Image: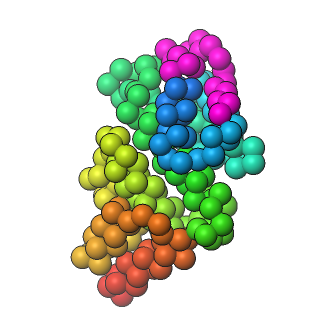
């Protein structure tokens, strides 16, 4: 699998393109993406902000602001667990999009905040089951902010977090069910 990290050399952050490439290669294999899938990771090192997204699935291009990969305790340094978390979540969403059985979710920019949170919960839960460190409480709090601080939202979160083999319809149904339980 060809993985390209851009830029190849960093001048504003202390990142190693080969290290990021290795993380992507490991994740692509573990997640079960096609072995011949070409991946481009385009990093904007000029901003400490933390947005990362799939810019294109065909070809697969992930764009990230350098803050998405930085160690919060050591600014401008790469956080391997943080980078794995960000890239793993995105690569699981790509795997879902490439699977015809998953369904046809809207483009990322067209997702509601609740849908995005539900799908991220599903992706990160699977990443954790691969043995990578994930921040369950952080994800639960994010999910509750989008679905309410209710027992129904917590049950929906647990269902998404522990699930495998869900479709887009399943994810939206679980999310909608949690939203429906909100007090009027």
Residue most toward the bottom? 184
Can you give x and y, in whole percent of width and height, for residue 50 in the image? 50, 37
Question: What are the residue bounds of the magenta stretch?
Answer: 1-19
Name the residue located 40 percent from the left edge and 82 percent from the top edge: 177
The front one of 39 and 66 is 39
Quarter in which the C terminus is drawn = bottom left
Name the residue located 36 percent from the left edge and 20 percent from the top edge: 74
Q: Quadrant of residue 145?
A: bottom left
Residue 24 within the magenta-colored segment of the rendering: no
- Can residue 115 be seen? yes
Q: Is residue 2 above or below residue 151?
A: above
Q: Is residue 154 left or right of residue 180?
A: left
Q: Quadrant of residue 155?
A: bottom left
Q: Main secondary structure of the magenta part?
A: loop
Name the residue located 40 percent from the left edge and 27 percent from the top edge: 79
Q: Is residue 127 above or below residue 146?
A: above
Can you give x and y, in whole percent of width and height, for residue 162 in the image? 33, 63
Q: Is residue 74 above or below residue 148?
A: above
Can you give x and y, in whole percent of width and height, for residue 123 in the image? 45, 55
The front one of 24 and 176 is 24
Q: Is residue 22 left or right of residue 56?
A: left
Quarter in which the N terminus is drawn = top right
Residue most toward the front? 35
Residue most toward the left? 151
Residue 4 within the magenta-colored segment of the rendering: yes
Name the residue located 31 percent from the left edge and 46 percent from the top edge: 135
- Can residue 145 be seen? no
């Amino acid at each position: 699998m060809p993985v390209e990290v851009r830029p190849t050399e960093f001048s504003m952050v202390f990142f190693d393109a080969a290290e990021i490439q290795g993380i992507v290669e490991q994740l692509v294999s573990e997640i079960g993406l096609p072995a011949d899938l070409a991946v481009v990771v385009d990093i904007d090192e000029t901003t400490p902000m933390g947005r990362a997204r799939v810019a294109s699935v065909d070809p697969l291009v992930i764009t990230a602001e350098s803050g998405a990969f930085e160690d919060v305790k050591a600014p401008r340094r790469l956080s391997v667990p943080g980078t794995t978390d960000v890239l793993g979540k995105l690569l699981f969403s790509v795997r879902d999009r490439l699977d015809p059985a998953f369904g046809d979710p809207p483009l990322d920019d067209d997702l509601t905040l609740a849908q995005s949170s539900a799908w991220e919960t599903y992706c990160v839960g699977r990443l954790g089951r691969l043995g990578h460190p994930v921040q369950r409480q952080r994800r639960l709090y994010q999910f509750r902010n989008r679905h309410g601080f209710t027992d129904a939202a917590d049950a929906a979160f647990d269902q998404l977090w522990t699930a495998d083999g869900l479709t887009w319809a399943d994810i939206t149904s679980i999310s909608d069910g949690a939203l429906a339980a909100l007090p009027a």
